[in-house]
Amino acid sequence: MARKRQPEKPAAPKMKGYIAGAGEIVQQDISDTLRQNFMPYAMSVIVSRAIPEIDGFKPSHRKLLYTMYKMGLLGSARTKSTNIVGQTMKLNPHGEAAIYDTMVRLSRGYEALLHPFVDSKGNFGKFYSRDMAWAASRYTEARLDELARELFRDIDKDTVDFVDNYDNTMKEPTLLPATFPTVLVNANTGIAVGMASNICPFNLAEVCQAAIARMRDPEADLFQVLQAPDFPGGGQLIFDREQMGKIYDTGRGSFRVRSRWAFDKSANCIDITQIPPTTTIEAIVERVIDLVKQGKLKEIADIRDETGLEGLKITIDIKRGTDPEKLMQKLFKLTPLEDSFACNFNVLIGGVPKVMGVGELLEEWTAFRVECVRRRTYFDLQKKQEKLHLLLGLQAILLDIDKAIRIVRETEEEAEVVPNLMIGFGIDQIQAEYVAEIKLRHLNREYILKRTEEVEDLRREIDELQGVLSSKSKVKTIIIKELEEVAKKYGQPRRTRILYADEVEEAQIVEEVPDYPVHLFFTREGYFKKITPQSLRMSGEQKLKEGDQVLQALEGQNGDELLFFSDKCQVYKRRAADFEDTKASVLGDYIPAQVQMDEGESAVYLIATRDYKGYVLFLFENGKAAKVELAAYQTKQNRKKLLNAYSDKSPLAAVLYLPEDQEVLLTASSGRMLLFHTGLIAPKTTKNTQGVQAMNLKKGQRLLKAQLYQEGMLQNPARYKKKLPALGALPDSGEGGEQMSLA
């Protein structure tokens, strides 16, 4: 917010150290402040800190690894980590802790990467434990892992650009010329300003094969060679082809990873040896303990962390008679033993963040690697051409070594030696300088012949290098060969097991509730009561609002599911246990408010069920009847509200629950009645079916009511039984009055 300039104060006397204008409040537009101060910071975080580049590294990773490379830690003995941290500060001006943290996460001991780049010795903590902290840098040792050779291969042959470090005292690479797609092989997570990156790891051999397949055929199906992500901690990945295809295509999406476990029958316990990469041992143990305290995991007797030198292990002691398979399905549902991994393949390409799928990432890496190989080839070509040029000059003096010696001896001034050799043998200055620098002991015919024998080999090698530079296919052939070598030398079997989604059992977690008999009452105004038999026996009359009446009085259980049908073609699902036991002397729960019905919506009918057997019969004012299987309203996700519960083509006249087919009596506005058996109507699984015509109605008439027929309701039932659809029959004088009273 802009602030007003304060009234000017008298000018302060100028003293030593006085700064003009210091302490003044100056009016400034906040958008300008953000643009000038915050935006550079945001860009710095995005480009120089949090988002990895196409070589698979963030700047902090690259600076650390390059420092270790320059220290000679590739293929040598280990050195103290604190020494590495100190040397890295020449490129990365951050504190010791930040640099050491970076090294820990790249190390073999930490176990966060499928293919670590740092060969560590000492306590480097564990990725899967929150409390297992790493030792200080003065106690641990490290060197570059053998795989790091592939990161720095030919880095001294101008394969990548170098820039000055922060104080211009040394050079550092902008990228590492990795010979395989490291960006997909090791996990990488970063949070920048306004964006983030989260890349899951894939098996190295599979990634190399995928890169080769895409180079040979840009339309190659990645699933043929790159099955799914592969995590260092193993686990079981639940594979859904559609979800994984989205990740491969767009770089965004998620999938589930669950733990690996085994049941020890002799000890009656479950041993968990691999967990998802997004959680820790402590988070799992704490969650299980919390659920046991809440009474949701009564099958568990004890849980403990038994992780040791042999690796991760969580042991769960279970009570006798518990099915371990069912318990694990429950744990997968309720705890981090199964967790989701959200992918966001955000990578810097040419300094610009871009979210890409696996295929596009491989294409970008291939383009980057093609450029590296071309630059390396051009570097080698230049060196060989320079060497050939020098050898051709040496070859020229082979014709007359004595002449060369004579020219040197007879030249009075040293500065004239090179020009005289140029004139005497017809060679240029570079060649003459090379000849002039030859040691006296090398001025023999054998030495010169050996050097000049290389000329033909150099010419052949130069032709090959020029052929590579002029052919993109030859460059790709070189890259493919290198990828095959890397896959063969460093490839490992998959650690993460693949489970196909359609084969995975999903546990249905049903909260245990006390089950006991109850009486359920539902009124015309939409009030509901749940009363125990004992309370009902001790109660008097039902308390109701003035003008209200009980429409349904049902006997059920506290664990029953209740379906409240509304007049807006919707059904609301609750359990009887969701309502408190009450008494006849209270009004009860007002259902439209209790289940959060829409404005103006009313409840019209209640069904209590446990097994969803039977049918729902809908009778409409146009005389149609629809019989829907009650199972059509059963959902796996325990949804609270279902839309399109019945047809809206005609106003609803009545709803009836049919445990089994039976006779139903219909009454029209004309007074006609029709008695039919519901077995004549075919059941439907589609909830909003319009049904079939049951009662024919004349213009202006409508179906008024429907009720389940009970013996004795009619003196002559046969009179009202007709073949559907039918008009029905008018009641005789004896039955008319009875039906009017029923209405």
Image (cartoon, rainbow, N blue to C red):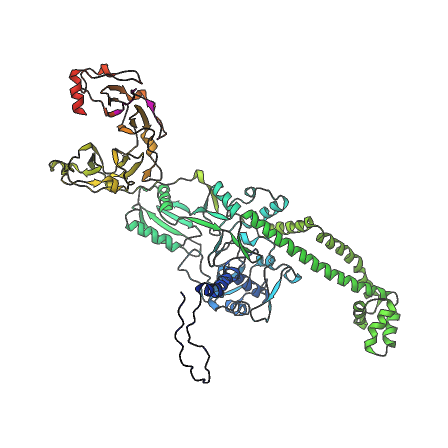
Q: Is residue 541 above or below residue 740?
A: below
Identify the magenta region. Answer: 688-703
Image coords of residue 510 (percent x, y)? 31, 41
* Residue 707 drawn at (x, y percent): 23, 25
Left or right? Give the position of 109 relative to 706: right
Residue 363, horizontal then vertical, whole percent: 59, 49
Quadrant containing the N terminus is bottom left
Viewer-nearest residue: 701 or 622 = 701
Horizontally, is 497 left or right of 699 in the view?
Answer: right
Please say if 11 is above or below 709.
Answer: below
Of residues 553 and 258, the one nearer the viewer is 553
Judge whether residue 121 can be spotted in this image.
no
Q: Is residue 701 found inside the magenta-colored segment of the image?
A: yes
Q: Is residue 518 visible?
A: yes
Is residue 109 part of the magenta span, yes or no?
no
**Which quadrant of the figure has residue 163?**
bottom right
Q: Residue 174 location in percent, x, y?
A: 59, 62
Q: Main secondary structure of the magenta part?
A: loop
Name which residue lies at 60% across and 69% down.
170
522 relative to 669, above or below: below
Residue at horizontal 79 percent and vertical 65 percent from the top: 390
Against 461, residue 338 (above or below) is above
The image quadrant where one finds the C terminus is: top left
